[in-house]
Amino acid sequence: MRIGIDVGGTNTDAVLLDGRQVLAAVKTGTTADVTSGIVSALRGLQEQRAFDSADVQAVMIGTTHFINALVEARRLAPTAALRLSLPAGASLPPMVDWPQRLIDAVSGRSYLVHGGHEFDGRHIAELDEAEVRKAADDMGQAGVRSVAITSVFSPVNAEFEARAAEIIAERLPGVAISLSHEIGRVGLLERENATIINAALRELAAHIVDGLAASITGEGITAPLYLSQNDGTLMDVDFARRYPVATFASGPTNSMRGAAVLSGLDTCAVVDVGGTTSDVGVLRHGFPREATTDVTVAGIRTNFRMPDVLSIGIGGGSLVRHDGPVTVGPDSVGYELTSRALVFGGDTLTATDIAVAAGRAEIGDVARVAHLDRELAEAALRRIASDVADAVERMRTSAEPLPVVAVGGGSMLLPDELAGSGEVHRPEHYAVANAIGAAIAQIGGEVDRVYAVEPGRRDAVVDAAKQEAVDRAVAAGASPSSVRIVDFDEVPIPYLPGNATRIRAKAVGELQLTDAKGR
């Protein structure tokens, strides 16, 4: 058995699975400390379907802790950015495009030293180790506790980043170090930004992961704990401590993966309607389509792996206004829904109240919305349907109609048919699809690199890239016999010499597990 948990802004959902069969599913309110909400969800599973903790093989959690910490600019460690780029990369310093409040929140310091590579691995300049030592000494005096190291074209050749990390570790023992070639893709500033964000979250990651682990073991479960990544795969707790940035989009990703399993559709649009927002994404071969452009997170441009998701401010807690044309959202009562919505005795008209008044849902006290005008309810639901249909249309990349799968507790707000897409599929257990997506997630490995492809060597280079992706998945804990390539891109780069080609290969496989009884 597996347990999947997804911590959202409004609700914490949990499921108990035996293979792909759902044995129990619960939805509880997200708590301010988050971990007590997880404990409540675990106890709810036990009440619904008693199970032996020793039979649980793994616990998978998707969490919003880290993206929230960045957006709210809190609990971030004092961080330094070291870029190995002189003399070539001096015109735009690290954090040049960051909002000032985030620079202040990380006490941001930046250092430029000699080093870096060309796209084919040749040196731009030799690494100046004396400069690195001088920078490290200044970091120590400034109280820096986490360091982000970025070198030009390090995804092609990471030797300078590795050496700089050794020097800083010698000079500043105990300081957390993040290396850009392990986090972002080709593209210096965006990769550097992702690495600095990761570095700023390292201390919080250790605290949060320990707290999550304690909440699981406190309930007598000794199975390994995994966290969901942005691309729909899993990482173990040690990886999560080092790369918290990889969890940023795990919420919508889990929902999409869960929608694929529940609906049986591996290519479709997924609309996940939560308490605050609706996330619209597209599945290809059962995995979320990844963003091909830079992704802005909390006002910072980054290029690490993120799903292509369009979020709109429509959810169960969205405020409904009708003093003019009827509008729904984007503001929401969020996790206060159960105290502020009309059906729960509050004084705020929300989308949930509209759904109850229209007979779409049976939640709270129906009598409290009996006074609502029928035309108001229908107008609000039409507005929701129109906005969601527009979002789905914007996510399409071809003229072919995409089936639409609706998941999430707020999906009762959607009609049975969407304009331009036809029937809306609502599979069984749709309200907890996010937790199911976490529970069935697989282990992945990816390669994203620029290769110099010599004439007649294309097939050999492609095979080597695919094999490296497979090897990375196996090293991360995938069962070797189950690993397969699920995504592959090959893009020639005409402005670089040497027949340069960017190759990206992604492999996934089933998690190799044993339970507490060694099975």
Image: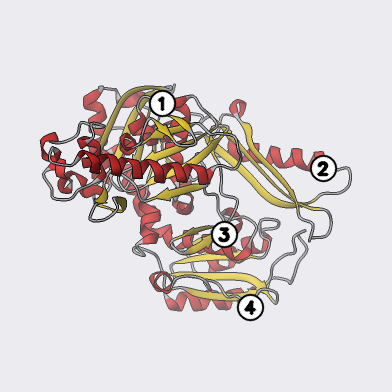
Mark 1 belongs to which amino acid? Answer: Asp
273 in relation to 77, above or below: above
Mark 2 belongs to which amino acid? Answer: Arg
Q: Which of marks 1 and 3 is nearer the N terminus?
A: 3
Q: Please give the label number shown on residue 515.
A: 1
Q: Name the residue under label 3.
A: 179
Which residue corresponds to the image point at 36% horizontal and 56% vertical from the top-left?
68
CA gap, disc 2 to disc 4?
36 Å
**Which percent across, then down, holds residue 378?**
28, 39
Q: Name the residue under label 2.
A: 458
Q: Which of marks 4 and 3 is nearer the N terminus?
A: 4
Q: Please give the label number shown on residue 91.
A: 4
Residue 37 visible from this viewpoint: yes
Which residue corresponds to the image point at 22% horizontal and 37% vertical from the top-left?
40
Answer with left or right where residue 510 lies relative to residue 100. Answer: right
**Which percent across, then down, holds residue 92?**
60, 75
Nearest to the eye among marks 1 and 4: give it: 4
**Which percent across, then down, holds residue 163?**
63, 63
Q: Which element type, helix, strand or loop, lies under badge 1?
A: loop
Query: Can you say which quadrant of the picture contains the N terminus?
Result: top left
Mark 4 belongs to which amino acid? Answer: Ser
CA gap, disc 4 to disc 3?
22 Å
